[in-house]
Image (cartoon, rainbow, N blue to C red):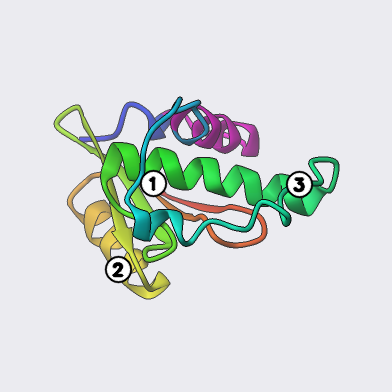
Amino acid sequence: MTNKTLETFESNSDFSYFINSRFKKDIGNMRFPEKYEQKRPPKTVIADKSNPEVKNIVDRELIRDNIFVLHKFDIYEYPIVVFYENKSKEILKPFKLPKDAEKFSISLLDKGYYSLLINIMNHEIDCKLYK
């Protein structure tokens, strides 16, 4: 019961491709709840697109939007996620604490499922593959 997606991961570029292809898609003119929008950075903060820190913030907002649209949770509330496949269905499970995500990933591995723990809100996105 291995995961078709995760069994192909061999390098950091595989992780980057995974993040980019799943969570950095243009979502068009989606409307978000007011409570969600209130957590966005001020436009003055993200105005300087040449600043690497601003690019990082903009990337995180795009990832946040994609996850909210596709999986119905906010990474500001659940900054750690575990991706896994179950019977050809892709699942992204949110967590608030790293230890809870790690325990869940270990329990999946015990059942024969690979998983990818992703800490989205670090300065650099951290991924840990349980295989």
Q: Please tell me in which quadrant of the rendered image residue 78 appears.
A: bottom left
Residue at image point 59% right, 52% down: 125
Image x and y of residue 102, in percent: 36, 66
Residue contact between numbered discs 2 and 3, judged by CB atoms under 8 Å: no
Query: In the image, is residue 14 part of the stretch drawn in magenta?
Result: yes
Answer with mark 1 or mark 2, whichever residue precedes in sequence: 2
Considering the numbered disc 3 on the image, is that residue within a helix, a strand or a loop? loop
Question: In this picture, is 68 found above or below 77?
Answer: above
Check disc 3 and report the residue beneath it: 47
Q: What range is drawn magenta here?
A: 8-22
- Specify the label residue 42 is tagged with: none
- Give the Cα distance between marks 3 and 1: 41 Å
Distance CA(mark 2)–CA(mark 3): 40 Å
Q: Is residue 54 left or right of residue 71?
A: right
Q: Amino acid at mark 3?
A: Ala
Q: Residue at x 38, y 66 (%)?
A: 77
Mark seen at residue 103: 2
Frontmost of labels 2 and 3 is 3
Q: Secondary structure at mark 2?
A: helix
- What residue is shown at x 51% (from left), y 55% (from top)? 120
Residue 39 inside the magenta-drawn segment: no
Identify the mark nearer the N-term, 3 or 1: 3
Q: Are marks 1 and 2 in contact (CB under 8 Å)?
A: no
Q: Which mark is residue 131?
A: 1
Q: Position of residue 7 (x, y in %)?
A: 40, 32
Distance in Å between CA atoms under marks 1 and 2: 14 Å
Q: Position of residue 31 (x, y in %)?
A: 36, 38
Measuring 38% from the left and 33% from the top, which residue is drawn there? 30
Q: Amino acid at mark 1?
A: Lys
